[in-house]
């Protein structure tokens, strides 16, 4: 049923969003967590038609040209991943594309952003996942992850090309980057681009919203309560 429903996004986009908007609670777990994780794990073997834009190390020096190949011109939101820390599943490389695709479906269904104004992007710098490197159906570069200068140069070219092609106001959401890159990229581009990291700021803001809402029910002020943080995602308290 998950494959049928998600396939509907490609076949009949209008019907897909009508179904999603009318049945949000029931369908959210299918479009996003937890089913999206399973889809990412099996992405190579269920891959039919590409959704979203892939940018790889091989496109270094040509990223602006690659962006210009995307048929839609007026993009408002980009969700981008490099696939290194997909949910709790770890490094899924190029197969992480399911995350930006799923997250942008939520932008449209819940935030009212036109689907044509949303651009899912996966930056392929390789993968350290041996299982994927040996999988005949793996759709990404078959090499270990680029790191250091090579990695950050590619990301810098990407961020510059995005602004050049879509203007100052395009929102870039970093999604499922590994901890060591997530904080670095946010600090680097937070003052020059309209960016946020969903795993750091998105999660934190939702937790804070929950706490503020709870205070209205249980009373008292924020400093009067004690909070327990459990888990080890990208959010630091």
Image (cartoon, rainbow, N blue to C red):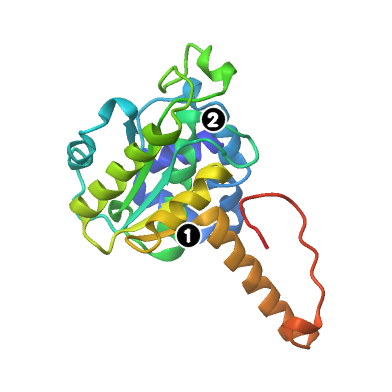
Residue at the far front in the pictured view? 149
What's the mark number on residue 182? none
Judge whether residue 8 can be spotted in this image. yes
Quadrant where the C terminus is found in the figure:
bottom right
Residue carrying label 1: 21
Q: Quadrant of residue 146?
A: top left
Residue 68, percent across and down? 17, 42
The correct choice, above or below, for 89 with respect to 80 in the image is above
Q: Residue at x 53, y 46 (%)?
A: 31
The answer for how far apart the CA atoms under marks 1 and 2 are is 29 Å
* Mark 2 surroundings: few (<14), some (14-19) or many (≥20) residues within 10 A: many
Quadrant of the drawing holding the N terminus: top right
Report the front residue among 11 and 147: 147
The residue lying at 70 percent from left, 74 percent from top is 211
Regarding residue 123, the answer to whether it shows in the image is no
Check disc 2 and report its element: helix, strand or loop: loop
| Image point (27%, 64%), residue name | 169
Q: Secondary structure at mark 1?
A: helix
- Snapshot quadrant of residue 156: top left
Q: Is residue 160 left or right of residue 230?
A: left
Residue in the foreground of this view, choosing between 150 and 27:
150
User: Residue 179, position in %: x, y?
Assistant: 57, 45
Q: Which x, y percent locates residue 114?
A: 31, 58
Q: Earlier in the sequence, mark 1 or mark 2?
A: 1
What is the crowding at mark 1: few (fewer than 14 residues within 10 Å), some, or many (at least 20)? Answer: some
Q: Nearer the viewer, mark 1 or mark 2?
A: 2
Residue identifier under label 2: 92
Residue at screen point 81% across, 79% down: 225
Q: Tell me where residue 81 appears, x and y as whole percent.
A: 45, 42
């Amino acid at each position: 049923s998950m494959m049928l429903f998600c396939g509907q996004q490609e076949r009949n986009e209008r019907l897909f969003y009508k179904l999603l908007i009318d049945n949000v609670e029931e369908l959210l777990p299918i479009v996003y967590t937890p089913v999206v994780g399973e889809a990412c794990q099996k992405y190579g073997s269920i891959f039919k038609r590409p959704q979203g834009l892939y940018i790889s190390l091989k496109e270094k020096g040509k990223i602006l040209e690659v962006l210009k190949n995307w048929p839609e011109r007026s993009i408002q939101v980009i969700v981008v991943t490099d696939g290194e820390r997909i949910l709790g599943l770890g490094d899924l490389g190029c197969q992480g594309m399911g995350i930006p695709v799923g997250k942008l479906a939520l932008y449209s269904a819940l935030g009212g952003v036109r689907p044509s104004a949303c651009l899912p992007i996966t930056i392929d710098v390789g993968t350290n996942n041996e299982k994927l490197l040996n999988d005949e159906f793996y759709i990404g570069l078959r090499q270990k992850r680029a790191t250091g200068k090579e990695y950050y140069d590619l990301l810098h070219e990407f961020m510059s090309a995005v602004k050049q092609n879509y203007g100052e106001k395009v929102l870039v959401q970093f999604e499922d980057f590994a901890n060591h890159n997530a904080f670095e990229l946010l600090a680097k581009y937070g003052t020059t681009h309209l960016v946020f990291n969903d795993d750091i700021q998105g999660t934190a803001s939702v937790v804070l919203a929950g706490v503020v809402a709870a205070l209205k029910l249980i009373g008292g002020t924020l400093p009067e309560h004690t909070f327990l943080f459990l888990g080890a995602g990208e959010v630091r308290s």
